[in-house]
Amino acid sequence: MINVTVDNSSLLRNDVRKLGNILGEILVHEGGISLLEKVEAIRKKAKSLRENYNEELYLSFKEEISSLKPPVRQQVIRAFSIYFHLVNIAEQNHRIRRHRQYHLHEKGCVQPISIESAVSSLKENHFSEDVIQKVLNDLSIELIITAHPTEATKRTVLETQKRISKLLQQFDNPMLLKKQRKDLDESLFNEVTALWQTDELRYRKPTVLDEVKNGLYYFDDTLFDVLPDIHEELENQLQSYYPSHSWKVPNFLFFGSWIGGDRDGNPNVTPEITWETLKLQRKLVLKKYKEAATELMKRFSQASSRVSISEELIQSVKQDEQLYLEPGEAWPIKNEIYRRKFAVILKRLRNVGNTKIGYRSAEELLKDLVMIKESAEKHQPANNKLKKIRKLIRQVELFGFHLATLDIRNHSGEHETAVTEILKVVNITDDYSALSENEKVAVLEKVLGEPRPLLLVEEDYSEETQEVLNVFQMIKKAHSEFGSRSIEVYLVSMTQSASDLLEVLVLAKEAGIYRLHADGTVESHLHVAPLLETVDDLIAGPGIMKTLFEMDVYRNHITERGNHQEIMLGYSDGSKDGGTLTANWKLFKAQKEIHDMAKEFNIKLKFFHGRGGSLGRGGGPLNRSILSQPAETLGDGVKITEQGEVLSSRYLLEDIAYRNLEQAASALLEASANASKNLLQGYVREKSWEDAMEEASKYALTKYQSLVFGDPDFLTYFKQATPLRELGALNIGSRPMSRKGSERFEDLRAIPWVFAWTQSRQMIPAWYAAGTGLQSFAMQNDQNLKLLQDMYKKWPFFQSTINNLQMALMKADLQTAKEYINLVEDKEIAERIFNDISDEYKRTREILLLITGNQELLDHTPTIQESVRRRNPYVDPLSFLQVHLIKNMRETDDNYEELLTEVLLSISGVAAGLVNTG
């Protein structure tokens, strides 16, 4: 079958060859030798076309593609698609292999970007225990699974891929017997066969609860165990490098979710769905605790006749058995005190929600587990840690009874509409929405400054307003049922003014989540966070927050929330609105300006980075995302979205999940420690660097908007020269592709915007206009290019920006993209806009090579460079087929369903080949 070298490692090549050969055998079985020969012929022509382009070969390749007929055509599409899935598995397996090799074979060699490397660096730079402990106390990473998964791969397929990966790992065992290796070969063949014989397309859109269950899969399978392991590794490394200090690492790494809580533009997310989400999360976490407690019960078999058990524990067992257990439920062996206690724990876990028997809070469970641990440690050798129970204690601390904090998000317009109706009913103002911003703020301040509620008990509010009110009432109820950590933040998308946040506080006040008592004291049980998305909103952000921080009523709320303010920054819409270079700079600048302003008010800020998985939506490795932020903003913690398209690649396999989170933790630890001493490279930035970015950004913005908003034919080109129309049928998410079902560009969501450009191989959201911006600045005088080169060497933000641009250009392919302009009905529009894109591509490539000093794109990361370069030719057949099929489908109604299925298979295959979706 297809054989591509995706790394210079012979072990990786062996894995790819092994999987490719199996797929080849399956093709022969499913379609005969003729199918394998057809796939091979197409593969060889695609590869030759890349290596030595000529018109005759190009026409022959296109003829080979267009001559395919059903059912062979679909089999060819699936052959290339499944091959990419297998290559992805092999690459992940090799990443796991390399991680283990550091620990097994390279004695004394510390793996880069690991927790050990971070602690080792702190030691080398003479950080004291006290300084490190202070950094640890403030360290915080929150990773949020988003409510709009764009994972193009079905759950069933992911599970098969996971089994294939597990089997591959076993082949590395040097102690395998001949029979065991034969059994592994057979199992691997069976799993790849199952992958081929599984229908990879969804035939209905997932419901919100389907998405919730998909998210919970990662908690169940990897995150529940990996998160405590990261904390333990940090504790162990600190103990190893600083043995004289007794370390207790605070909980700093958390996962949250938007799935089931993100209402913005998704009418399917109702208060009832959010409530059901919270119930499902609690059900899972209780199941995990019961499993862990059952296992511990087996291990804690010590008898009081053999060891000395604490009197506190003995008395608690006697009391608990009387309070919570029925006759016959107690552990029958009286001197096995620990098992008697675990019997009580399991009974109370099974009855959470039953206030008479069940645990009312995770803190009650925690108290019982700590009691057991402290008693057992007294008869345990001093240097031997009780790892199993310590891990469960950490898990309860991390996950509580809520599993993952659920953020609620809604559009600012929804709140304004509800508040307008409420204020009219009580005769405060006839049309709140028509007031000026200053007038709105004055009205809201007055309402928040009075203890009296606004809502009338018997009043019939509109369905829309009642729905908004129901959300806040549900939050209040959730705090009582699932704990205050179940919902902590309410995000206001499209925040454009201070009143947008005050409206949410008013609605929270009506539900009793925010309260002003008669004596003037304030209660506030919910963070209210703005989401700054567009370029204009990012520019306005510092002013919006300053207005709020200067208000007594808002400062009282902030004080009650620990003097803490969360601010979310949207990468997708900013890039869609102003281009990637401008958006990245405005995001950086907004963080710096808001941070400096908040410091004057002594307010701690946590920036929430709404990054996507793809480059056009701020994607990239977690550790690079962290290091590219203004260093001074890291001290109060970092929050980052983990969007649907990266979940399987980062968290499907436990080893990969561990490595991904380890890199993030190590990057933040080292950066925060260095920032605390102003040592972090890039902490002190040259003013000339910021001036350069400001200038380049202006040029880039003008260029970007001249095409996207200035060319009246651009939207036509986009809709016709990409598979945008067809993406809606891929059934990868519960949300509509656009807000309000609108055809307007402004209402199109960033996910399909990026996904469609990625499929067409143009990828303009990830790079377009950056070349004009950088080149225009460089050409102003002889010194500017040297300045950009220095910035690349010394400024992590600029280095990350340039490297992401290189990756985007490497993955884009305008030779293949040119095929998509055949889908545009007006040839003049097609040629004109594509030529502009092509010219900008050349311009961007030239300036990037000058700035980096590279001969070719990604010379600094040869492994990734080689992987992308080797993959591209094998994506080509899928892209050519996609264009051919879309053209046929748009021109005729004949065989529409069959053609659509094949188009969707090609979309899934391209996504797997490029390791990108939206």
Image (cartoon, grey):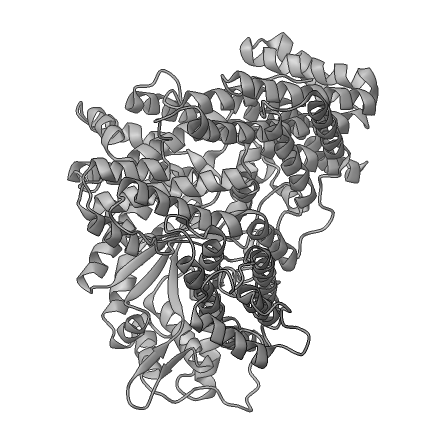
Residues 511 and 287: in front is: 287
User: Which quadrant would the N terminus be assigned to in this image?
Assistant: top right
**Front-most of 83 and 464?**
83
Q: Residue at x 25, y 28 (%)?
A: 793
Q: Nearer the viewer, residue 774 or 699?
A: 774
Q: Which quadrant would residue 201 be assigned to in this image? A: top right
The answer to whether any part of residue 240 appears in the image is yes
Q: Position of residue 570 (x, y in %)?
A: 41, 51
At a point 54% along the width and 67% down the height, the residue shown is 337
Q: Quadrant of residue 424?
A: bottom left
User: In the picture provided, is 309 more to the left or to the right than 912?
Assistant: left
Q: Residue at x 47, y 70 (%)?
A: 313
Q: Position of residue 568 (x, y in %)?
A: 38, 56
Q: Is residue 450 left or right of residue 408?
A: left
* Residue 493, picture quadrant: bottom left
Q: How many marks?
A: 0
Q: Nearer the viewer, residue 614 or 137?
A: 137
Q: Residue 717, percent across and down?
A: 55, 36
Q: Which residue lies most toward the front here?
A: 305
**483 vs 590: above or below:** below
